[in-house]
Image: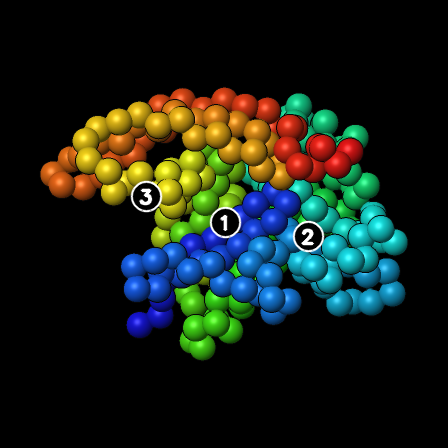
Amino acid sequence: MSKMIGIDLGTTNSCVSVMDSGVAKIIENSEGNRTTPSIIAYPKDSEEILVGQPAKRQAVTNPENTLYAIKRLIGRRFDEEAVQKDIDLVPYKIIKAKNGDAWVEVKGKKMAAPEISARVIQKMKQTAEDYLGSEVTEAVITVPAYFNDSQRQATKDAGKIAGLTVKRIINEPTAAALAYGVDKTTGDKKVAVYDLGGGTFDVSIIEMEDIDGEKHFEVLSTNGDTFLGGEDFDQ
């Protein structure tokens, strides 16, 4: 029976983990790093598609064909304010698809955001398979608490394109609370989780309740700035 993996699909970096003896093990990629840049590149004179560190290394000399921060586009409509703001910030071409979604055009090819993000997820899948020595078919993927249904479904679609059955989409602040062992404490409580990432800085209020001996998490509210992350600090 193959193991299920957990994927943090980030704006700037992504990582993959697996449960090992009850502990989450973050797996190193082929470059020996525990995080992989969420970057995909299409070299000018090649049909090869670069993902992760190789894509990042050539970004300066090939900016218009190097895709990053695609998480800001996934599940969004072209006319949304966030997408229009992104158009002014990135060197690659963001276009309006026939259905009104925000797509990207690279070297004459038009692509949906889930198709691009799937490349990063495939890299995470391969990283896990190299470590485990077996095929991986199921995953849990984290998303920001503010993601709407369209963005969550688009993330699941990206996982499917990458060859994974996405068993669950988990809110990032909930995953953070679990990682810090908050679920091991007793009693009901409310916790504030601050998340300063590559694309956003947000805060979420999470309520935890003991129901029939199991911890139940609910994000009561979330707020933040989707253009106040590491990518924006670099501008």
Residue nearer the viewer, 232 or 92: 232
In the rendered structure, are the residues bearing label 1 and label 2 in contact, judged by CB atoms less than 8 Å apart? no
Q: Is residue 209 left or right of residue 69?
A: left
Q: Pointer 3: residues within 10 angstroms few (<14), some, or many (20+)?
A: few
Amino acid type, mark 3: Gly
Provide the secondary structure element on which disc 3 rests. loop
Q: Position of residue 185 (x, y in %)?
A: 24, 38
- Mark closest to the chain's N terminus, 3 or 2: 2
Q: Is residue 133 left or right of residue 209?
A: right
Q: CA distance from mark 1 to mark 2?
A: 14 Å
- The residue shown at (48%, 72%) is 131
Q: Position of residue 18 (x, y in %)?
A: 40, 61
Q: Is residue 223 left or right of residue 210?
A: right
Q: CA distance from mark 1 to mark 3?
A: 18 Å
Residue extending farthest to the bottom is 133
Q: Pointer 1: residues within 10 angstroms few (<14), some, or many (20+)?
A: many
**Which residue is disc 1 drawn over?**
8
Question: Visible in this render: residue 62?
Answer: yes
Disc marking residue 181: 3
In the rendered structure, are the residues bearing label 1 and label 3 in contact, judged by CB atoms less than 8 Å apart? no
In the rendered structure, are the residues bearing label 3 and label 2 in contact, judged by CB atoms less than 8 Å apart? no
Amino acid type, mark 1: Asp
Amino acid type, mark 2: Ile
**Which residue is disc 2 drawn over?**
39
Q: Position of residue 228 (x, y in %)?
A: 64, 28
